[in-house]
Amino acid sequence: MDKPKFIRNIGIAAHIDHGKTTLSDNLIAGAGMMSEELAGKQLLLDFDEQEQARGITINAANVSMVYNYKNDEYLINLIDTPGHVDFGGDVTRAMRAVDGCIIVVCAVEGIMPQTETVVRQALKEKARPTLFINKVDRLINELKVTPEQMQERFVKIINEVNKLIKQFVPKEFAKEWKVSVEDGTVAFGTAFHHWATSVPFMKKTGITFKEIYDHCANNEMKALGKKAPVHQVILDMVIKHLPDPLTAQEYRIPHIWKGELDSVMGKSMMAVDPNGPLVICISNVIIDPQAGVISITFVVYHLHFFA
């Protein structure tokens, strides 16, 4: 947390039931913070009784984890956001606390109304997007699509997401923030079955698209989860393509903070200066049965979460 270059502040956002919290479970398990067998079943960040009873995320929930990438340790601060339209305020607050996000889209349902909403909310707060196309196994095992039909569906989803990005992205990032299979800002897989892949991952490992399709068709997804762990593919994408605080605060502080940018406080936040004035922001308040009122805050100079 004292090395902003090695910090990633990210959110996960999607339409309801497209798999955000299941993906969060996998990322937490990949960081060694819960059992891999429970990932997708534990729904760790759905901590509220109503969330567990109703099977949906109501409150934005955050967690910090450490991930090793190319022999360097990275601190990943993650917020899992609600997908239901009734809790959109939590998404907006979360996007103000992160520098980038993973937009999750169900491969079967595709772009849905709340997908458009969360993309708009992320871009409005200048949080850079990446894309994860989830539930790919359902295309193969339920809809019985061919490899060619599956790729056509991916292209359609990616094009629709890029259309939304083009519509809502800040002008200065119009070209840079489009998602692309070729550059690795798009991944696809099945969080519930713990696997994912991307073009960079396939090039690095030699795993082919045909091999992935055959594993799904033959119901060998557990083996696929060992070959292509979803947490590795997604966190590699996050570290490579989403900005660190040193990069992001230069353009995000003028957007989210309405004070004087030329002041000592403004300059220290934009420079991510750990010796500058302490500035914190409360992004959420929850009631814990044991502890009472808890505020979720982050230190603005590098956006690290504290409860």
Image (cartoon, grey):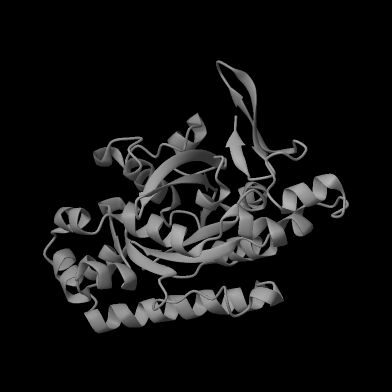
Where residue 46 appears, x then y in whole percent?
A: 47, 37
Where residue 219 appears, x then y in whole percent?
A: 14, 60
Where residue 215 appears, x then y in whole percent?
A: 15, 65
Task: Note whether residue 236 is visible.
Answer: yes
Is 63 on the left-hand or right-hand side of 199?
right
- In the depicted structure, whether residue 245 falls above or below residue 214: above
Q: Nearer the viewer, residue 160 or 1?
A: 1
Is 302 on the left-hand or right-hand side of 277?
left
In terms of image quadrants, where is residue 197?
bottom left
In terms of image quadrants, where is residue 147?
bottom left
Is 103 on the left-hand or right-hand side of 235?
right
* Quarter placement of the N terminus: top right
Q: Nearer the viewer, residue 90 or 79?
A: 79
* Quarter placement of the C terminus: top right
Task: Note whether residue 108 is visible.
Answer: no
Residue projecting furthest to the front: 275
In terms of image quadrants, where is residue 33?
top left
Residue projecting furthest to the top: 290
Where residue 291 appears, x then y in whole percent?
A: 59, 17
At 37% from the left and 76% from the top, the residue drawn is 154
